[in-house]
Image: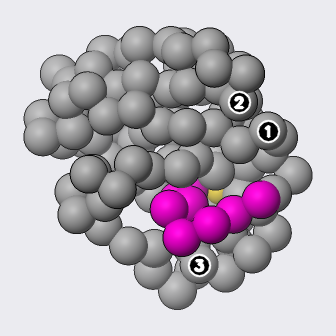
Amino acid sequence: MPKIVYVEHNGTAHEVDVAVGESLMQAAVNHAIPGIDGDCGGLCACGTCHVYVPAAFAALTGTPDELEQGMLEFAFDTNETSRLSCQIKATEAMEGMRLQLPARQY
Ligand code: FES
């Protein structure tokens, strides 16, 4: 069960044990992490689960597909490291990954 660290825009870090196969959005919502809303429940239809993935983990999390890329256009302050956390499923190899959260979700 990898530990994922969610880092709020103000620097507050929250360490969460995430079950392998669980989405990084769902784990954050289950633990009431401030800054991850997940309004659509993980259907890639709201863009309120935006996170920044560190470069060292980019190969593990993959790249956004066309649907996710389209939703990211509605997210706040995106960059090349932006992902929708509902589209990333936890793996053991993600142990210690620190996800930065944007200043707001929309
Ligand atoms: Fe809605 Fe991720 S939870 S796009």
State the SS at label 3: helix
Q: Position of residue 103 (x, y in %)?
A: 79, 38
> The disc labelled 3 sits on which kind of residue?
Gln
Local crowd size for mark 1, using a 10 Å CA cut-off: few (<14), some (14–19), many (≥20):
few
- Please give the label number shown on residue 103: 1
State the SS at label 1: loop
- Looking at the rendering, which quadrant does residue 34 occupy? top right
- Please give the label number shown on residue 69: 3
From this viewpoint, is residue 41 visible?
no
Question: Are the residues tagged 1 and 2 within 8 Å (C-beta)?
Answer: yes
Residue 73 as seen in the image, left or right of residue 94: right
The CA distance from mark 3 to mark 1 is 20 Å
> The disc labelled 1 sits on which kind of residue?
Ala
State the SS at label 2: loop
Q: Earlier in the sequence, mark 1 or mark 2?
A: 2
* Residue matched to label 2: 9
Please tell me whether the stretch drawn in magenta is mainly helix, strand or loop: loop
